[in-house]
Amino acid sequence: MNIETANRLLQYRKQSGFSQEELAEKIGVSRQAVSKWERAEASPDTDNLILLAGIYGVTLDELLTGEPERVSSGKTDEPQNNSQESVESSHEEDKDSKVSFKHGIHIHDGGDKVDISLKKGIHVHSKDGTKVDIDNSGVSVIDDNGEQKFYTDEDGHIHGVNKCGGEKSKGVYRVFKRFPYPILAVLGFLLFGHYDIVGGYSTCWIWFLTIPLYYTTIDAIEKRNLSHFCYPVFVVMIYCFIGMYYSVWHPMWLLFLTIPIFYFFANLLKPKAQTAEDNQKKENSIVPVVISIVVTVILLLSMCTAIAVMTTETKTYGFKRPLDDLHTDNIIIDSISSDINIFPTSENSYLEYKSVVKGLHNENREDVKIEYSADTTKISECNYSLFFGYKRTTINIYLTEEKYYESLLIDSISGTVKGNDINAQKLTVDSTSGDIKMTHMNAENLGIDVTSGDVEIDGVFKNDVQIDTTSGDVKLTNVVTPKKMKVDSTSGDVILCIPKSTDGFTLEYDKTSGSIKSDFPLVGNINDNEGKAVYGEGKADFNIDITSGDVIIKKAVPQELVNWLFALPN
C-alpha cells in the first residue's frame, strides 16, 4: 500500500472519531493490523476495504484514490438497460455537487455526504462534523463537537449518552463500573453498625452516600473531567457525619460554600479539546484528574480540621485506674500515638491516662482499653474518637517496684517511650517513629526494633540483646557484657557501651558501606566487607550486619550506673 492511501486511512479514522482499537473491533481484525495499514506496512483485503468504506461513509474510489466517484453520463459500454443508473445533479452549476445511483444512492454536496446502500448501510456526514452511521456494526451518532450521542453495544442494544457520561466504558473502567460496590456499602453498614464502630448504626448509614462517590470518581477519571466527581454528595457526607457524631452542625455548614468553588476550578481544568482528533491527545490526561480529586478531598478535610480547631476550646481530661496484679506477670502496651511513661511504685500497679484535645471529640468514648487474660495484661489505645483537630495523649503506667516481671512489650507507632527502674525477664520495645529513652532497666533479654526514632537505653542486660534499626540512632549502655548481641542497622548509627573489664567478645560482621569502630583492640580486620575479629577471651558473641550506618563499640559505663548496680551511694 502506498503512503498516500495509508494517510487517507488514518485521516478517515480520525475524522470518524474512532481509535485503532475501536475500528479493529468494528471490522473484526486486530489493532496491530489497523496500525500496519496506516503505516503502509500492509494492505487491507477487499472485504476489509469494503467495510472501511462503509464505516467511513465513502466510496472505494475515495478511500483508495481520494477522488470522488465520477458520475456516469450515460455514455458507457454497459448494456442499455443500465445506462440510466447515473444522472447528473439538478444543480449542474455547482461543480462540487454530485449524485450517483450506482450500488445505492450517493449524494455529495461539498462537505456534506449521504450514502445509502443495501450492503454498506446508511451514512450521513455533514461538513460541520455531525455524523450518522447505520450499518451492520450498529448505530452511531456523533454531534458537531465530536461527542458520541448514540451507540450500539456488543449485544445489539442502542444506548443514548447523556451529559453526565454513560458512554460505553472500555477496559479497566468497565471492570470497575461493573463491580458491585453497593453490596460492599451494605456490608460496611452492617459491620460498622454491629460492632459499634464510629457511632454504630446511628452514623454508618453514611456508607450509602459513598455509592455515587465511587461511580462518579471512576467516571471523572475515565472522562478526564473533574466536574463529573459528585462533590456535593461528598460534602453532605462529611457534614452529616460531623453533625451526628460530634453534634457540631454549626459552623460546619460553611463546607457547602466550597461547592461552587470546586466547580469553578473544575471548569478551569476541564479539557478544551472537543473533537475526536483532539481527544486522541488527551489519552494521558488521567493523572491530573486523579491528583485533583485527591487534593480536593485533602483540602476539604483540612478545612474541616481548621474550622474544628478554631471554634472549639482546649479540653483536658483523663482518669486513673488500678491494674490487677494477679494478671501483670506479662504486660503488653499497644499504642498508636500516645506518649508512654513507665515508672516504679511502692503501691499496687495502676494506670493514668491524660488527654489534651482541641477540635471535635466524643468524650463518651474511652481511648484506652485494659484486657486481662491468665497472667497477661494488655493495654491498648483506641485512637478513633478524634476525627478533626489536635490531640495529645499520655499513658503513665506505674508498676510495682519489687516485682520481677516475666515480659514487658511496648509497641508504639509515633509516641515517645520513657521508663526507668523496671525489672523483667524480657524487655521488648518496638517503635515506628517515636523516640525511646529508658534508664536503669534490668532484663535478661532485650529487643529493640525502631524505624526512624532515636533510642537511648541503659541498664543490665545479661543474656541476649537484639537491635534492629532502619534510620534511627541507637545508644545502648550495658553495665555487663551480654552473652549474645545482634545488631542489624540500615542507615542509623549504633553506639554500644560495655564495661572495659569485659572478658572479651568475638565480633562477626557483614557490612556494605558502613563502618565499625572499637575502643577495644581487636585481633582481626574490621575494614573488609565481612569478616571476624576477637577481643580478649572472646566469650561473648557479637554479630553486626550494617548497610550504611556506623557501629561503635565503646569502653564507657557511667559511674552512676555502676553505683546503681551495686546500690552504692553517689
Image (tube, rainbow, N blue to C red):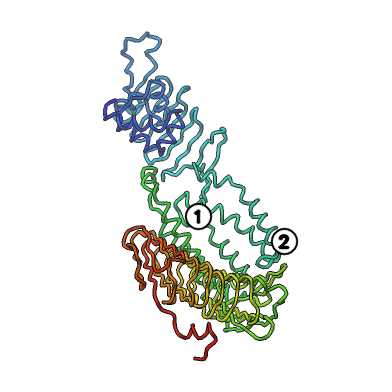
Q: Is residue 300 left or right of residue 386?
A: left
Image point 64% across, 80% down: which residue?
399
Amino acid type assigned to the residue bearing label 1 in the image: His
Category of crowding for the residue at label 2, using alpha-carbon neighbours closer than 10 angstroms: few (below 14), some (14–19), many (at least 20) = few
Residue 228 - label: 1
Image point 41% across, 64% down: which residue?
507
Q: Is residue 377 left or right of residue 416?
A: right
Label whose residue precedes the other's in the sequence (1 or 2): 2
Of residues 517 and 410, which is closer to you in this image? 517
- Could you tell me how many numbered marks the image carries? 2
Residue 168: x and y, percent? 51, 42
Q: Nearer the viewer, mark 1 or mark 2?
A: 2
- Residue marked by disc 2: 194
Does residue 93 appear anywhere in the picture?
no
Look at the picture and state if 276 lies above or below 124: below
Residue 205: x and y, percent? 67, 61
Contact between labelled residues 2 and 1, with CB atoms less than 8 Å apart: no
Which SS class for mark 2? helix
Look at the picture and state if 115 lies above or below 183: above
